[in-house]
Image: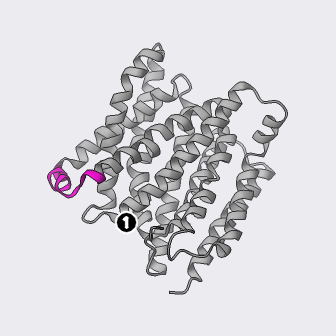
């Protein structure tokens, strides 16, 4: 039986949800830069650093409300937290970092840019969702924008890819599947929970992710090199804390709030802002203007969001 997902009751909820989605995308776009800035460290080390910091910050913030939350959570809730933390945080970030370091930001953005298409397709099957025919223009714009973003990367692959590019492509596809599962599962978990706020759920995800980072630490100690310079370690610490604070705590708090305000078919579109902001940050870092294809991608992705919003506002109550 198909699950009935929550949908907003009015335009005010839609506007607030979209603003939360834009803000979350602005913070999440930063995670694409971190692997590029800290190339001296492996994807596993970057994931452990980020999520240990996320876990410690979550412990400090959740301590005053721990007794109440523990009484509210069932065994199913804890199992949900475990697999959501793995799919949406630990494994996803390892794969994303590996994709950026071996395949480049452009190809990674292309693959991750198809998240809205997958999630919207799945969300359109839910009871009470906007009909697929009304969502089709938005999906086509999203696909066109993603293709524009990764056109150069695809051309490189077609002309004879290096082994590293193929590894990066595989990691990006795996990351796409992980985050699709997370977005759907997290939206449904938030809809089911009562008495737990979106911020508190984010902190609980931080606890679960921090525990997984601790479990991965022995593997990193055995298989990775730890001979980086002092300057490298200072950069690593700053990036770990910064990404944990901004992307994990701030970004997920905004995303969870948005997930309670918007239907899944519109939630998927909000992931586009992560891709857009990742590209903006990349342009600023590289000190260049977007190419014609990159500018076209911005237009297509923006049209995808606008047409999806229009489809939801036209939906009869």
- x and y, in percent, of residue 270 in the image: 55, 61
Q: Residue furthest bottom?
A: 317
Q: Main secondary structure of the magenta part?
A: helix
Q: Nearer the viewer, residue 46 or 8?
A: 8
Instruction: Work out whether residue 273 or residue 188 is closer to the camera in this orientation and state it.
Output: 188
Q: Write the residue at 68% across / 74% down.
A: 133
Give percent across and percent down for residue 59.
25, 42
- Please indicate, yes or no, whether residue 66 appears anywhere in the rendered image: yes
Residue at point 57%, 80% (across, down): 313
Q: Secondary structure at mark 1?
A: helix
In this view of the protein, can residue 229 be seen by the observer? no
Magenta residues (range): 64-77
Residue 213 lies, with reference to residue 146, above or below; the image says above
How many numbered discs?
1
Along the horizontal axis of the image, is 146 left or right of 8? Answer: right
Q: Residue furthest top?
A: 227
How far across and how far down the image is residue 289, in percent?
Answer: 73, 47
Q: Residue at x 69, y 42 (%)?
A: 106
- Picture quarter containing residue 33? top right
Color theme of the render: one colour
User: In the picture provided, is 6 more to the left or to the right than 63?
Assistant: right
* Residue at which label 1 appears: 191
Magenta includes 105?
no
- 67 within the magenta span: yes
The residue at the far right in this view is 159
Residue lying farthest to the left in this orientation? 67
Vertical arrangement, residue 193 with respect to residue 293, above or below: below
Q: Residue at x 50, y 51 (%)?
A: 181
Please tell me how crowded label 1 is: few (under 14), some (14-19), or many (20+) other residues with Cα within 10 Å.
Answer: some
Is 178 on the left-hand or right-hand side of 310?
A: left
């Amino acid at each position: 039986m198909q699950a009935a997902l929550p949908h907003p009751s009015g335009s005010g909820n839609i506007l607030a949800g979209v603003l939360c989605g834009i803000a979350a995308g602005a913070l999440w776009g930063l995670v694409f830069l971190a692997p590029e800035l800290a190339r001296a460290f492996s994807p596993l080390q970057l994931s452990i650093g980020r999520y240990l910091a996320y876990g410690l910050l979550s412990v400090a913030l959740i301590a005053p409300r721990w007794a109440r939350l523990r009484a509210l959570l069932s065994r199913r809730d804890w199992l949900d937290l475990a697999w959501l933390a793995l799919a949406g945080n630990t494994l996803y970030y390892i794969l994303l970092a590996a994709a950026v370091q071996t395949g480049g930001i452009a190809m990674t953005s292309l693959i991750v840019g198809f998240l809205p298409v997958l999630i919207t397709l799945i969300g359109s099957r839910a009871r009470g969702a906007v009909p697929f025919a009304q969502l089709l223009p938005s999906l086509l714009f999203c696909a066109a924008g993603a293709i524009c973003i990764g056109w150069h990367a695809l051309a490189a692959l077609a002309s004879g890819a290096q082994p590293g590019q193929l590894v990066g492509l595989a990691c990006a596809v795996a990351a796409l599947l992980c985050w699709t599962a997370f977005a759907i599962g997290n939206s449904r978990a938030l809809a089911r929970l009562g008495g737990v706020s979106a911020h508190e759920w984010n902190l609980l995800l931080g606890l679960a992710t921090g525990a997984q980072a601790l479990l991965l630490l022995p593997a990193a100690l055995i298989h990775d090199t730890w001979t980086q310079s002092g300057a490298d370690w200072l950069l690593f610490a700053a990036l770990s804390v910064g990404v944990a604070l901004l992307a994990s705590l701030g970004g997920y708090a905004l995303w969870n709030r948005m997930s309670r305000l918007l239907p899944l078919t519109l939630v998927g579109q909000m992931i586009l802002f992560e891709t857009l902001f990742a590209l903006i940050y990349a342009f600023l870092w590289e000190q260049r203007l977007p190419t014609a294809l990159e500018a076209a991608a911005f237009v297509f992705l923006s049209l995808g969001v606008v047409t999806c919003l229009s489809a939801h506002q036209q939906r009869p109550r």
